[in-house]
Image (tube, coloured by chain):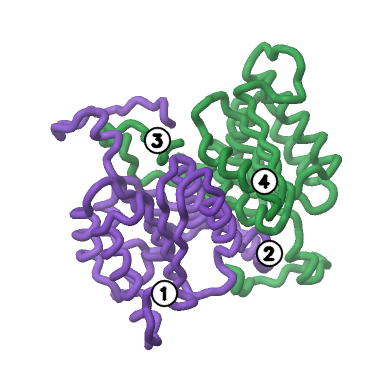
Chain colours: A green, B purple
Amino acid sequence: MPQGQPTVVPDDGLTTRQRRNRPLVFVHTGTGKGKSTAAFGLALRAWNQGWPIGVFQFVKSAKWRVGEERALRVLGDSGEGGTVAWHKMGEGWSWVQRDLASSEEAAREGWEQVKRDLAAETYKLYVLDEFAYPMHWGWIDTDEVISVLRDRPGTQHVVVTGRNAPEKLVEFADLVTDMSKIKHPMDAGQKGQRGIEW
Amino acid sequence: MPQGQPTVVPDDGLTTRQRRNRPLVFVHTGTGKGKSTAAFGLALRAWNQGWPIGVFQFVKSAKWRVGEERALRVLGDSGEGGTVAWHKMGEGWSWVQRDLASSEEAAREGWEQVKRDLAAETYKLYVLDEFAYPMHWGWIDTDEVISVLRDRPGTQHVVVTGRNAPEKLVEFADLVTDMSKIKHPMDAGQKGQRGIEW
């Protein structure tokens, strides 16, 4: 709620304005739906502000996010808001010219590019979709991720989605939402459907 | 996950295909962020399928959802996916020609239009943003909402967002996600910021 009044005024030496524009790290985790969809919803706001957006999709699937991807590409190309760069691990990252031996190697190559883009301040919003998994699986070092995010220059917001977000990352992040499943049609024997699941 | 296998095969007399295309009611509730942003993320998928989308914004605020609204309007006007009709209570519903005495009356007028559109099968996805509140406050009868949703014709998906979704609605809905706040920058004294909160 933009109108919300903070309950605590922090003793961090920042003005309200500086604090207001502080770059944020978001984590969307939990077993329910909505972790990635909320991240892409956030991207709509960033687009509206004219921010360059970088999406890094750390999942291997042709079907996932096709709707979000097409919508964000159309928005990015509309010339009315920010730009959108969409990077997909499933088809091989565009900057990697050789075959990657494993998902682990692919995830690491993705993270290397995120680091380069953060250093270069390429985007103003990073959607690191399903990035919690390679950290959870130990493919990417959570301490390194936290260190890189802590030291990132400028005003770059970062959203990390995925189940099992490492506790250390949750502690470090500015905003964490746990999406809990209360009920899902698959529990009642329904398969995913077009327009709803992808 | 579209690839997911249901754990139970229901004894409902429907084929897998019928079940797969069953119209769904979603509820996004809880105290955390992401309830509405996930609903608008879902709208991106619906747009990609070419579905007509109706958004009914049951909140009174000029600032809220400006990014989502502009993005969905650009998408709806792009001619590349579905259409988008965006209805805002804050500015008065477009179909109401007289002044509405109260938020309660305005909420009721919104629901009357949703009923008319459901009966006419105007949209294929309805985003009833913050619609949990008027039910929670007793302005709109939850039993009536459930009855109307249960009897709606055709294949019309409905998403209801907002805190304190009535328990009866949660029981009725097909898919319910509870967004729990683990951490929010306002707890640390930060006010909402442009591009993030709106």
Dots 1 and 3 on the same chain: no
The span from disc 2 to disc 4 (Cα, nearest Å) is 22 Å
The span from disc 2 to disc 1 (Cα, nearest Å) is 28 Å
Q: Callout 4, which amino acid?
A: Gly
Q: Is residue B6 left or right of residue A146?
A: left
Dots 2 and 3 on the same chain: no
Q: Nearer the viewer, residue B46 or B94?
A: B94
Provide residue A137's location: percent of width, then percent of height. 60, 26
Q: Chain of mark 2?
A: B
SS for dot 2: loop
Evaluate whether residue B58 shows in this view: yes
Label 1 with label 3: CB-CB less than 8 Å: no
Q: Which residue is mark 2?
A: B193
Q: Which residue is mark 3?
A: A194
Residue at the image position 58 percent from the left and 60 percent from the top: B70
Q: Which residue is mark 1?
A: B93
Q: Callout 3, which amino acid?
A: Arg
The span from disc 1 to disc 4 (Cα, nearest Å) is 30 Å
Q: Chain of mark 4?
A: A
Q: Callout 2, which amino acid?
A: Gln
Provide residue A155's location: percent of width, then percent of height. 79, 53
Dots 2 and 4 on the same chain: no
Q: Callout 1, which amino acid?
A: Trp
Label 2 with label 4: CB-CB less than 8 Å: no
Q: Nearer the viewer, residue A90 or B181?
A: A90
Evaluate whether residue B162 shows in this view: no
